[in-house]
Image: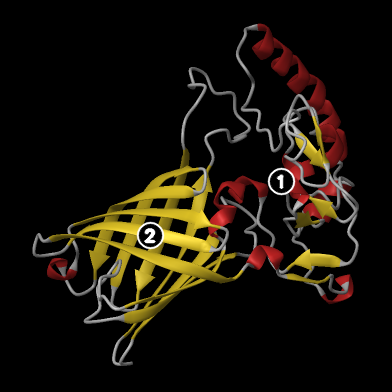
Amino acid sequence: QMTQTGWMILPITALLLHFVQSQGVPSKAVIDYCDARDANSCGTGECIVRRTGNRCRCPKGWMGVRCSRPCQDMFRNCPIWKQQDRCSWTRPITPFFGDNCALSCGQCQNVGLQLVNPLPPMLENIAWIVGRWESKTLSGERFPEPMRGGYREVLDVSPSEMPAFDRPPVNITVSAISLDGTELYKELGFMTSKPFNEDTGFVEFDKPSVGDDKVGIEMVSTTGLMTIEEGIVKGKSMKLDTVYKKSMKGAWHEYKEAKRLLRLIGPDLLEERVIYTNSHGETKKWLKRYTRVHDYLQDFIPVPNPDTQPRPIGFGV
C-alpha cells in the first residue's frame, strides 16, 4: 500500500517541482558534500555531481563526507523504508534516504565495521568537536560556574542514538574536579545544529542565498543551574550566547551574561574563550585549552549479529 501511494505521489511532486523551477525559484536547498573541482574533497573516493547535491562515491566499506565513515544506516527504520521503496521514488525529490540509509539503499557496502553511534550527515558541521577532551588549569574560572581554585575538567561530546523523530543531537557531559579533590561539578546536556542549507522538504520563498549554520546547547548542572546557549557555526569554530538560565537556588545564584567561542586550533586541540559577567556584575575573560584524548568518530567496532539487535518500529518518518 505504501509503495503504491509513493508512485501515485511521485508524478504530482514532479509536476510541482517543474512548476516551481519554471518560476526561477529552487524547490529546496541543494547541499553539496563534496566539490568536483577539488580532487581531495572525497579523500580516497570520487565526487559525483548530482542535481540534488554532490555526493562522494567511496571505496567499498566507506561512505559520507570525505569517505571517512564506515558504511551503515543512521536509523533503525531504514530496512522498513527500503521495503516501502523510499530509496527509489524519493530520489528525484530528496537525498535524505540515500544519505541516512546508505547501507539499506545500496549506496555503499559494509565490510564488517561500524561506529557505535554514527553521526548523521546533518551534523557534519560540528563533527570537529566530537570526542573526549581534557583540560587542567590553576585558575578557578569556569563556565557555567566557577570553582574556588584550580581544577581538572573532562568535556565529552559523543554521538547519541538516533531518535525516531525530531532533530538528532550529540550528547554533552562535562565533569570538573578541583585539584584538592574538595569540589566536583558536573553538567549533562546535548548539542544540535541546524545547517543554513538544510533540506526541510518545503519550498522556501525569499530565502537569502547565504547564511549561517546555527547551533544550540542545553545543559543542566548538579548545582541546580540550567542553561541554553545558541549561536552560529563557521568552519571549525562556534560562537555561543546564553539565551536562557535558571538556578534552583534563586536568581542570586545565576550569572548575568556569558559569551563563548569554541574553536579547533589543531587536530586535537580545542580552545575556549569566555566573557562572563557574574551575579555581582563583575565581568571576567579567560582562555582555556583542551586536548582530545579519544575520537568517537574513529571508534570502530565489529558489526553485531542482526538477530541480537532490537527490531525497528513499524512506522515511517
Q: Residue type at mark 1?
A: Val
Instruction: State the quadrant of the N terminus.
Output: top right
Q: Residue at x 84, y 33 (%)?
A: 89
Q: Quadrant of residue 17?
A: top right
How far is the residue under mark 2 from the one under mark 1? 26 Å
Q: Which mark is residue 317?
A: none
**Disc 1 target residue:** 65
Query: In screen coordinates, is 227 left or right of 199?
Result: left
Q: Secondary structure at mark 2?
A: strand
Q: Residue at x 73, y 56 (%)?
A: 75
Q: Residues within 10 Å of mark 1 (few under 14, many from 20)?
A: many
**Percent of width and height locating residue 280:** 8, 64
**Disc 2 target residue:** 272
Q: Nearer the viewer, residue 313 or 152?
A: 152
Q: Quadrant of residue 245?
A: bottom left
Q: Nearer the viewer, residue 15 or 55?
A: 55
Q: Residue type at mark 2?
A: Glu
Q: Nearer the viewer, residue 298 or 5?
A: 298
